[in-house]
Image (spheres, rainbow, N blue to C red):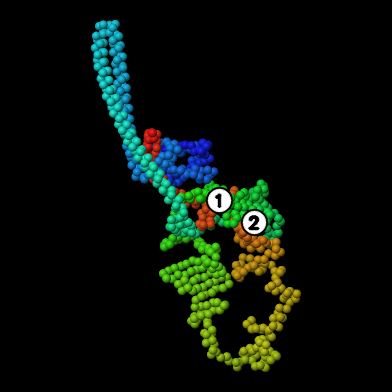
Amino acid sequence: MTTVSGDIRLVSDAAAPVSQVWVRAPKLRASDGAVVPPFNDHFPVRKGRVSFNCRPGPARVTLIVAGVPSESFDILVAGESLDLAQAAADFLLAEGQSEQTLAGYLQAMREVESAVRGFEGVASQAADRAGVARDDAESFASAANDSSDAARGHKDAAQSQASAAEVSAKRAEGAREEARRSWDGAQASASQAAGSRDEARDARDKAREHSQEAERQAGRSENAANRLWDSVTWNGDRLTVADRQSEPLTGPQGPPGPAGSLDGLEPETIVRTGSEPTFGRTVTLNGGTQFRIEARDDALFVIDAETNRTIFNANKEYLQLGGDLRIAGGSIIGMSAPTGPHQPATKQYVDSSVESARVELPDDLVRAGAQDTRLGKYLTVDATDQGNASASLFLKKNDHQYEFFTNAAGKFGAWDKRHSRGLYQADRNLFEHQTAVSMSNNQLRGLPRPTGNDHAATKEYVDGAVSNVSVDTSGLLSSSDVGSGESTEGNKLVRRKGDGAIVVPTTGTERRVAVSRGEVDDKLAGKSASGHTHTMEQISDLRPDTLIRSGSEPELGRTATITASGGTYYAILKQVNGSHTLEQYWTPSGDYGIYSGGSNRIVAKANVFEHHTATDMRGNELRGLRAPTADNHAATKAYVDATVSGVRDSVGELQSRIQLVDSLPSNPDSQTLYLIAE
């Protein structure tokens, strides 16, 4: 592991305003028996000084200013410790070289370094042996001098000492010869080291030539990259680069968030059941913190009552959150740069992140010809912004193709594309079956002749069935029986009077016989007040719970209307399930909302839609967003980072194998070419 450290400074030599650096491999690679993925590691910068550990090989350093990624540069890391500026210079020297060329340079440098290290060792050992021999010679010479001095004082002993001195002198001569041979070996080693240095100089010259060629290649690559940007266009959710178009990049809608809890809520403590209260100018909501809702200056304000700080305000033109964050005209303005994975990205952040990006299609897109593609719970086809074009779903099998559509007129139907004719279409008032059986104009036409008891009968079938029916009129009452009186004669068919009225007995003795109007009037006499004039259109004093019984499950008609009179009341539809209450309401100004748990869930106004869910828009930020699935969705930081991570120019890996040094490191990397600067 190599320790890389150094200063990051401005041209004025002041410390650069960099809070941290992100370091990662330019692309996936192997290093020292491990796989190094292109993921960022974060290191702090203090007063312009940074230090971090890095595996040998190429790396990309990104400077973070005010929490936002700024500039990036590449470094080449090798050895045990390295200066950041030297690592950047080494990468520039190696830039543009192929891996094969760099590997050859590295092998040559390793051989040169090994030879130099061996020669240095031999020379050092020879010098050590020469020093030992020199010390022995000096010791022997000193002993000889001592012996000579002793000989002067002691003649008899001098002869013996002279003999010993002669022996010592011979030994000293032998030591001098050994030292001379060691010195000659050291000279030969030094000569070999000089030859190795010449080989290293030749390798450095070749490296410079390759570096110059790399600069030329980099220039050509930069020109090609600049031309590439001119060919990048968007067509809906498809990306076109150099005349090659991607598949649609819109993914499926994500799952809905968890439902809120209304446990412990007592709706009667908020607004009495059955009442229709009129509120004043200010409504105060009491909780851990008090808030005020105010309507002033043609806008709605939500204010923290304790700090008097505006949480958000909205009018027909925009929605402004707290400080500078504003939603207006389909845009979000004033967002801070994202610092977390779930925060929305600004245009500047996205533009800087996707610079030189290469878009890769995710695997979960629905592709042409894909088999057994599984979608989520919902599939929405939205043609709202497509003029009069229908929102359609096509099903095709061989030559048969059908279209299910919802058109601009609000009708849903099916179309046979092969025969260019409709099958059916329907709206809330009419279902039209466009085959042999026609149900238009409130009639049923084209029916086949009925063959079963539950089949619809045609006019032809009915006319044929009754054409030969004869009625025996012999048992009818004579006209004299029904002139002005009434007949009770049995076993006779009843006849009508001239005005069409049926004559019946005055009193009925059986439940199955018809009774006269007079008997009905007599039976109902006294059952109701004479002044009671209520009809089905006048039930002003009728209790609502007598219309629909509590606990019942009635089926209503197509439209149920709730009218708030007076112009100041809300029209409210309240739904209760146990302790949970949900209210849908319309305000006199035309705002529609859903209220539950002491607060609004959503409020839809003329130009503003307020969605009160887990999406957090406090502090001039948007948090808790789901991953975007459409072009107009706000992108999260995690989505942007995941999209552009690792998408960089691959030149870095090809330019990562040469390092310029003043001297060879003690523990060189086997994959690095070291160039010695002179």
Which residue occupies the foreground of this view, 649 or 125? 649
Which residue occupies the foreground of this view, 361 or 437? 361
Q: Amino acid at mark 1?
A: Arg
Q: Which mark is residue 623?
A: 1
Q: Position of residue 130 (x, y in %)?
A: 30, 23
Mark 1: which secondary structure? loop
Q: Could you give the CA–CA distance between mark 2 and mark 1, rounded to whole angstroms? A: 23 Å
Residue at the image point whose x is 43% and y is 62% from the top: 368
Q: Position of residue 435 (x, y in %)?
A: 49, 76
Q: Quadrant of residue 128?
A: top left
Q: Amino acid at mark 2?
A: Asn
Rate crowding at label 1 as few (under 14), some (14 to 19) or many (20 or more) other CA atoms within 10 Å: some
Residue 298 position (above or below residue 455)? above
Residue at the image point whose x is 63% and y is 88% from the top: 494
Q: Nearer the viewer, mark 2 or mark 1?
A: 2
Residue at the image point whose x is 44% and y is 36% from the top: 83
Residue 34 position (above or below residue 381)? above
Residue 100 position (above or below residue 377)? above
Q: Position of residue 474 (x, y in %)?
A: 60, 93
Q: Which mark is residue 315?
A: 2
Q: Position of residue 375 (x, y in %)?
A: 47, 60
In the picture, the quarter occupied by the C terminus is: top left
Q: Quadrant of residue 156?
A: top left
Rate crowding at label 2 as few (under 14), some (14 to 19) or many (20 or more) other CA atoms within 10 Å: some
